Image (cartoon, rainbow, N blue to C red):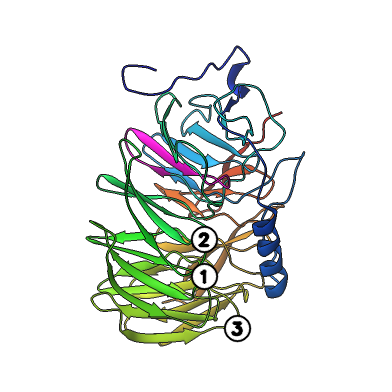
Amino acid sequence: MNAGGDVLLDKGNEGRNTRQVLKKGTISKLLLLAVLLLVLASGLAIPTCRPAKGVPRGWSGASVTDGALFLGSMSGELVAIDKDTRQRLWPDILFEKKQSGGFTCAQGTEAVAIYGTPAVTAELVYITGYNGKMYAVNTETGALRWVYPREDELDPVIGGPVVAGDKVYFGGSDGKLYALDAATGDRLWVFESGDKIWGTPAVNGSTLYIGSFDKKLYALNVADGSLKWQFETEGAIVATPLVYDGTVYFGSFDRNLYALNEADGSLRWKYQARNWFWSCPVIADDIIYAGSVDGKVHALKAESGEVVIVFDLESPVSSSPVLAAGNVIVAVEAGQVYSLEAGTRQKRELVSLEDNIYAPLASSEGVIYIHSADDVLYAVDARSGATLWSLELESE
């Protein structure tokens, strides 16, 4: 342990591809089956736990800071990349489940899929795993600061964490929303919904918003987890809510996009598409852009839900879009990335990758970061569509 309280794991002398193995064990077959059944029922082609070289795969997006990128690789590693040099900041951290417990540096055979995008502060990066644990890692060194729970494990965690103030929040397949002390990992409070939580929470001021498979969106007090209000839909909710100008926007598996009053949860409007809303929408110039697995992006007036234009992208949208270079940037599962502008009704293809895209997009300073299903990270100019660089993440 160093002076900062981090657990320093022996990395050996294998160079930048050395893996720090945290924990390993068996994967929940029941939840895997549930994922597959859900995907098959919807016709949505998501690589839930598609094996590659014996390793389960997730769809983590990238978190961008001033100088670095943090994301979960398809092979179950936390990767930290210098934005300028594209070199690893520290050796990739491989999260594994180990039935014997404890920490080890031996490479195992069953890694932990990472679905959620990491949350990053100046000091720590937080990441959740399918093994039912959250890890806090030093952003400078990659040393483990803490893990929750410290012993045993929760049900699998699909959604990512969110940090707000001195707390970090995440939901699990056990139907619970956890609030931890961001510095120590101590549990502060727990809220229990009626079914699995697969989404990433959203926090605005003193309120946290989270959806559940029990078809409800919950508004919770961040101080103690007490319920402020709840709103029930007709389908499971996995999309991260978007809070804008006193309104909470979110999509449901009942094919509706909802707009609720932030104060009391009353319905302002709802809009129905032909299939699920899986991703988090974005708002530009008071127009909300919501991608659906019906292959379209629905651009609606944020105030009323009135349709401005529906962009037909001819492939499901499960990746959350971003704002960059003054436009909305959307990726479709088939690998195309588009720049959209509802006011001018402009749809422009920026780039077409020879790979599928499921992970949320990230953007910074006019650059879009795309994590493809082949475990390649692309940096694309948001204006020209030029690929600035690409980096294969999977270790040899």
Q: Residue furthest top?
A: 13
Q: Which residue is mark 2?
A: 198
Q: Residue at x 36, y 17 (%)?
A: 2
**Tags 3 and 2 touching, CB below 8 Å:** no
**Mark 2 neighbour class, 10 Å CA radius: few under 14, some 14 to 19, many 20 or more:** many
Graded by Cα atoms within 10 Å as few (under 14), some (14 to 19) or many (20 or more), the crowding at tag 3 reads: few
- In the rendered image, residue 123, in percent from the top left (x then y), is placed at 33, 32
Give coordinates of residue 220: x percent, y percent: 30, 65
Please tell me whether residue 281 belongs to the stretch shown in magenta. Answer: no
The residue at which mark 1 appears reads as 213
| Residue lying at the far right of the rendered structure | 53
Q: Earlier in the sequence, mark 3 or mark 2?
A: 2
Above/below status of 275 relative to 108? below
Question: In the image, what residue type sits under mark 3?
Answer: Arg
Amino acid type, callout 2:
Trp
Q: Which residues are magenta?
A: 119-132
Q: Which residue is mark 3?
A: 274
- Residue 274 shows in the view: yes
Residue 32's place in the image compared with 376, above or below, is: below
User: Residue 373, percent across and down?
Assistant: 67, 50
Camera-side mark, 3 or 2? 2
Disc sitting over residue 335 in the figure: none
Quick check: 6 left or right of 82? left
